[in-house]
Amino acid sequence: MNDMSLGDMPWIKSYPPGVNWAREIPTSSVQQILEQSAARWPNNPALNFMGRRISYAELEDFANRAATGLQKLGVGPGVHVGLYLANTPHYLISLFGVLKAGGTVVNYSPLDAAKVLEHKIEDSQTDFLITLDLTSLYPQMAPMLGTTRLKKIIVGNVAEMSGNPEAVNAQMQATKQLASVPNDDRHLTFKALLDNDGIYRSYPVADPADTVALLQYTGGTTGLPKGAMLTHGNLTAATNQCVETTHTDPPTLIEGAERVLGVLPPFHIYALTVNMLLGVRIGAELVQHIRFDIDAVIKDLVEKKITAFPGVPTMFVAVLNHPEAGKVDLKSLKWCNSGGAPLPLEVQRSFEKLTGCRLAEGWGMTETSPTGTFTPVTNEPRAGSCGVPSPGITIKFLDTSDHVTYVALGQTGELCIKGANVMKGYWKKPEATAEIMTADGFMRTGDVGYMDEDGYVYIVDRTKDMLLCGGFNVYPRVLEEAVYQHPSVAEVAVIGIADEYRGQSPKAFVTLKAGAAPFTLKELQTFLKDKLGKHEMIHALDIRAELPKTAVGKISKKDLYDEESRNAKAS
């Protein structure tokens, strides 16, 4: 990768001063990220949760105790431990505890159906699982005991990590958020897990690039999800790639001095790397929220003087549409990153105008841990671009017709990526792994896009999301960007619906800004007439109070497609 010429890497000329594509990206065990920060900033706050601050020294001690408790249960190399958790201190304590014990982490989503949970437990060979006594979590996992290979569930309590456990527990009981958990040999409390001296047997990670730290299941649109094998090297490389992008002159982030808003769900790879691991790596204070509540977010942005806010576009749209947004001081923000879905240019511009902070877009995926591109904060944003390849990452575009030839700059193809952050492969699926790898070691992503002469990447859409309208390729992102320019539109998603004449036609699902007047399909088409080609024009419109979202807060096109399919069968 490093033997390429500057001509092969046009993005280097777009890098901000101080950021170096060729700088060595260090890798290590994931637990070393915490160990090094705890040694460097022992008294600095690591976590800020429900009125309690946990220092780096305390977080390290908790993780050591978790490791000891897990080893007493039999966790060690080759043993897989599931994390089925909300965004509370339990997550980071458990993550580092499992890895210190020598085990492998398996992430589980609270939105998984029972069939998917069963599949993940059996497929990943999960023997132990850590969760919380929340009604949104424990009751869904409890039936897996005795019906799957799962041996024991370790159950934490949200209040035990708060500043006022009695008050928090009382409030959660009053609102019926707490589940009843049996007291038997198949259950263990999180408190009991940590009730030890924290002296555990260390298993050094000899080869970070080869040793799997995490099985992260992909949210595929068809079939059962596949487990991406993310190694210690993948995750620490991705974390340090993020760090390198902040080495601007002056630095975008200052180590040991930042406050990061933690509202992304922790089981998502974007949250794990760009929020938690990056936060711990730079010695930041991570302000955790169990869920995304816009009122609580605005309050913390103002009162806690948050400086870094990684999120998804819907979160930034919510900030912009909040009635207090224009009345409060949000100028403490200096690093805001949008990922997980395309960022509309109108949202980017409005957010920067409101806060004075550039909202930078990046691209990545589960299989890339999830780094891929970043938007240099010193450069003017480019409409529709997700930025340039991150340090240590090379991106090329493969001809979608022959899947062998790389296309020239400016030509559309399938994005292919190479770097230390790219997964080891799919768990127990060597054929699926081989299928997405090119002969020269790049991973095919399934994303269609192109790179301009300055190295900026433009994703036009997923190959499977591309619409074929009357023989023309139509990319939903282009249509969404156009609809977002309408002054009444808060959110939009475009999908393809059946059309007897054209094969497919675009349908827009829209939510409106507060107080905005609705509009008809004809009015929308008139607005879009000078923005879209005839083959791209929206043919159907559905204005809703809200759009379906995934666990990480992305608009769920899968749910919209499923709904359209059901409606078609019923009609």
Image (spheres, helix red, strand yellow):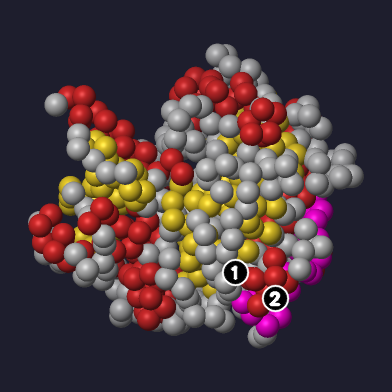
Q: Position of residue 392 (x, y in %)?
A: 73, 62
Does 197 sit above or below residue 307?
A: above
Please say whether residue 365 is visible from this viewpoint. no
Image: magenta residue range = 14-38
Q: Is residue 523 or residue 249 the one in the foreground?
A: 523
Residue picked out by circle 1: 455
Q: Position of residue 450 (x, y in %)?
A: 52, 60
Distance between mark 2 and mark 1 Cα atoms: 15 Å
- Quadrant of the rendered image containing residue 355: bottom left
Viewport quadrant of the C terminus: top left
Viewport quadrant of the N terminus: bottom right
Does 52 sit above or below residue 117?
A: below
Q: Which residue sits at x=63%, y=49%?
A: 405
Left or right: where does residue 178 sit relative to residue 35? left
- Quadrant of the rendered image containing residue 372: bottom right
Please say whether residue 345 is visible from this viewpoint. yes
Residue 36 among those drawn in magenta = yes
Q: Position of residue 320 (x, y in %)?
A: 33, 70
Magenta stretch, main secondary structure, is loop
Q: Which residue sits at x=44%, y=56%?
A: 460
Does 216 sit above or below residue 388?
A: above
Badge number at residue 302: none
The residue tagged with tag 1: helix, strand or loop?
loop
Q: Which residue sits at x=37%, y=52%?
A: 475
Closer to the camera: disc 2 or disc 1? 1
Residue placed furthest toward the top? 147
Badge number at residue 19: 2
